[in-house]
Amino acid sequence: MPKAYSQDLRDRIVGCVDRGASRRSTALKFEVSVSFVIRLVDQWRSTGSSRVRGKGGRPVHRLAAHGELVDRLLAAQRDMTLEELRTALAGEGVQVSRSSVDRYLTSRGLTRKKRLAMPPNRSVPMSPLPAPPGVSTSRS
Protein backbone atom coordinates (compact mmCIF):
# COMPACT_ATOMS: atom_id res chain seq x y z
CA MET A 1 0.00 0.00 0.00
CA PRO A 2 1.43 3.41 -0.89
CA LYS A 3 2.45 5.80 1.82
CA ALA A 4 0.10 8.66 2.70
CA TYR A 5 0.99 12.23 1.71
CA SER A 6 2.58 14.30 4.49
CA GLN A 7 0.42 16.50 6.67
CA ASP A 8 2.39 19.56 5.51
CA LEU A 9 1.50 18.87 1.87
CA ARG A 10 -2.12 18.27 2.78
CA ASP A 11 -2.30 21.61 4.62
CA ARG A 12 -0.70 23.47 1.69
CA ILE A 13 -3.16 21.90 -0.79
CA VAL A 14 -6.18 22.83 1.35
CA GLY A 15 -4.80 26.36 1.85
CA CYS A 16 -4.25 26.84 -1.87
CA VAL A 17 -7.81 25.77 -2.74
CA ASP A 18 -9.18 27.83 0.17
CA ARG A 19 -7.48 30.94 -1.26
CA GLY A 20 -9.41 30.48 -4.51
CA ALA A 21 -7.26 28.26 -6.75
CA SER A 22 -9.06 25.58 -8.70
CA ARG A 23 -8.64 21.97 -7.66
CA ARG A 24 -7.22 21.03 -11.05
CA SER A 25 -4.54 23.76 -10.99
CA THR A 26 -3.69 22.87 -7.39
CA ALA A 27 -3.20 19.24 -8.40
CA LEU A 28 -0.84 20.31 -11.21
CA LYS A 29 1.07 22.69 -8.91
CA PHE A 30 1.68 20.06 -6.20
CA GLU A 31 2.01 17.13 -8.63
CA VAL A 32 -0.78 15.05 -7.13
CA SER A 33 -3.92 13.63 -8.72
CA VAL A 34 -7.00 15.75 -9.17
CA SER A 35 -9.12 13.13 -7.41
CA PHE A 36 -6.85 13.35 -4.34
CA VAL A 37 -7.31 17.13 -4.17
CA ILE A 38 -11.09 16.80 -4.61
CA ARG A 39 -11.40 14.19 -1.86
CA LEU A 40 -9.04 16.06 0.48
CA VAL A 41 -10.92 19.35 0.12
CA ASP A 42 -14.28 17.55 0.56
CA GLN A 43 -12.96 15.88 3.71
CA TRP A 44 -11.66 19.21 5.03
CA ARG A 45 -14.97 20.97 4.38
CA SER A 46 -17.10 18.23 5.96
CA THR A 47 -14.93 17.41 9.00
CA GLY A 48 -12.64 20.43 9.39
CA SER A 49 -9.60 18.16 9.25
CA SER A 50 -7.18 17.21 6.52
CA ARG A 51 -5.53 14.47 8.57
CA VAL A 52 -4.91 11.02 7.13
CA ARG A 53 -7.89 8.77 7.70
CA GLY A 54 -7.28 5.29 9.03
CA LYS A 55 -5.84 2.78 6.62
CA GLY A 56 -8.01 -0.04 5.40
CA GLY A 57 -7.53 -3.64 6.20
CA ARG A 58 -9.51 -6.58 7.30
CA PRO A 59 -11.56 -6.05 10.45
CA VAL A 60 -10.89 -8.23 13.46
CA HIS A 61 -12.76 -11.51 13.07
CA ARG A 62 -15.96 -11.93 15.06
CA LEU A 63 -14.63 -15.12 16.69
CA ALA A 64 -11.34 -13.49 17.74
CA ALA A 65 -12.91 -12.44 21.04
CA HIS A 66 -13.98 -16.06 21.63
CA GLY A 67 -10.63 -17.69 20.84
CA GLU A 68 -10.37 -19.40 24.23
CA LEU A 69 -13.85 -20.88 23.82
CA VAL A 70 -12.98 -22.23 20.36
CA ASP A 71 -9.74 -23.72 21.73
CA ARG A 72 -11.62 -25.33 24.62
CA LEU A 73 -14.25 -26.83 22.31
CA LEU A 74 -11.62 -28.19 19.93
CA ALA A 75 -9.59 -29.61 22.83
CA ALA A 76 -12.66 -31.52 24.03
CA GLN A 77 -13.26 -33.04 20.59
CA ARG A 78 -10.39 -32.72 18.10
CA ASP A 79 -12.24 -34.18 15.11
CA MET A 80 -15.21 -31.80 15.34
CA THR A 81 -16.67 -30.74 11.98
CA LEU A 82 -17.32 -27.11 11.13
CA GLU A 83 -21.06 -27.59 11.61
CA GLU A 84 -20.55 -29.31 14.96
CA LEU A 85 -18.26 -26.49 16.08
CA ARG A 86 -20.79 -23.89 14.92
CA THR A 87 -23.55 -25.68 16.86
CA ALA A 88 -21.36 -25.91 19.97
CA LEU A 89 -20.58 -22.19 19.73
CA ALA A 90 -24.31 -21.45 19.38
CA GLY A 91 -24.88 -23.46 22.55
CA GLU A 92 -22.43 -21.12 24.29
CA GLY A 93 -24.27 -18.05 22.97
CA VAL A 94 -22.00 -17.23 19.99
CA GLN A 95 -24.02 -17.06 16.77
CA VAL A 96 -21.83 -17.36 13.66
CA SER A 97 -22.14 -19.01 10.25
CA ARG A 98 -20.27 -22.15 9.23
CA SER A 99 -18.21 -20.20 6.69
CA SER A 100 -17.29 -17.70 9.40
CA VAL A 101 -15.99 -20.54 11.57
CA ASP A 102 -14.02 -21.85 8.57
CA ARG A 103 -12.45 -18.43 7.86
CA TYR A 104 -11.49 -17.99 11.51
CA LEU A 105 -9.90 -21.44 11.78
CA THR A 106 -8.08 -20.96 8.46
CA SER A 107 -6.70 -17.63 9.67
CA ARG A 108 -5.27 -19.49 12.68
CA GLY A 109 -3.80 -22.22 10.47
CA LEU A 110 -6.32 -24.90 11.44
CA THR A 111 -8.41 -26.88 8.98
CA ARG A 112 -11.59 -28.87 9.50
CA LYS A 113 -11.99 -30.64 6.18
CA LYS A 114 -14.00 -33.78 6.72
CA ARG A 115 -14.81 -36.44 4.15
CA LEU A 116 -16.69 -39.56 5.12
CA ALA A 117 -15.75 -41.45 1.97
CA MET A 118 -13.85 -40.56 -1.15
CA PRO A 119 -14.51 -41.92 -4.61
CA PRO A 120 -11.88 -44.37 -5.85
CA ASN A 121 -8.85 -42.83 -7.50
CA ARG A 122 -8.12 -44.28 -10.92
CA SER A 123 -4.45 -43.33 -11.10
CA VAL A 124 -3.21 -44.12 -7.58
CA PRO A 125 -3.96 -47.25 -5.54
CA MET A 126 -6.00 -46.53 -2.43
CA SER A 127 -6.72 -48.40 0.76
CA PRO A 128 -10.00 -50.29 0.58
CA LEU A 129 -13.00 -48.66 2.21
CA PRO A 130 -13.94 -50.18 5.56
CA ALA A 131 -16.60 -52.89 5.45
CA PRO A 132 -20.06 -52.03 6.75
CA PRO A 133 -20.82 -53.20 10.30
CA GLY A 134 -21.56 -56.90 10.59
CA VAL A 135 -19.73 -57.88 7.40
CA SER A 136 -16.64 -59.99 7.86
CA THR A 137 -13.60 -59.14 5.75
CA SER A 138 -11.47 -62.10 6.79
CA ARG A 139 -11.01 -64.91 4.29
CA SER A 140 -11.27 -68.36 5.79
Image (cartoon, rainbow, N blue to C red):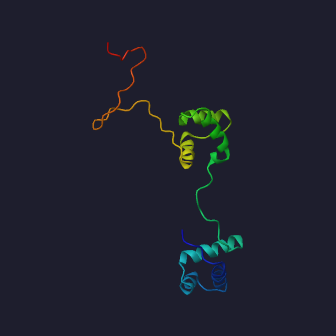
Q: Is residue 91 above or below residue 18?
A: above
Task: Say which quadrant the N terminus sits in.
Answer: bottom right
In the rendered image, residue 24, in percent from the top left (x then y), is placed at 55, 82
* Residue under the image location 67 percent in, 73 percent down: 51
Q: Residue furthest left?
A: 123
Along the line of sight, the residue nearer the viewer: 94 or 78: 78
Along the line of sight, the residue nearer the viewer: 114 or 75: 75
Q: Residue furthest front?
A: 140
In the rendered image, residue 91, in percent from the top left (x then y), is placed at 66, 32
In the rendered image, residue 11, in percent from the top left (x then y), is placed at 67, 81
Residue 138 lies in what quarter of the image? Answer: top left
Q: Is residue 22 left or right of residue 131?
A: right
* Residue under the image location 63 percent in, 47 percent down: 62
Q: Is residue 136 above or below residue 98?
A: above
Q: Residue furthest right?
A: 48
Residue 9 lies in what quarter of the image? Answer: bottom right
Task: Say which quadrant the C terminus sits in.
Answer: top left
* Residue under the image location 60 percent in, 33 percent down: 87
Q: Is residue 113 left or right of residue 13?
A: left
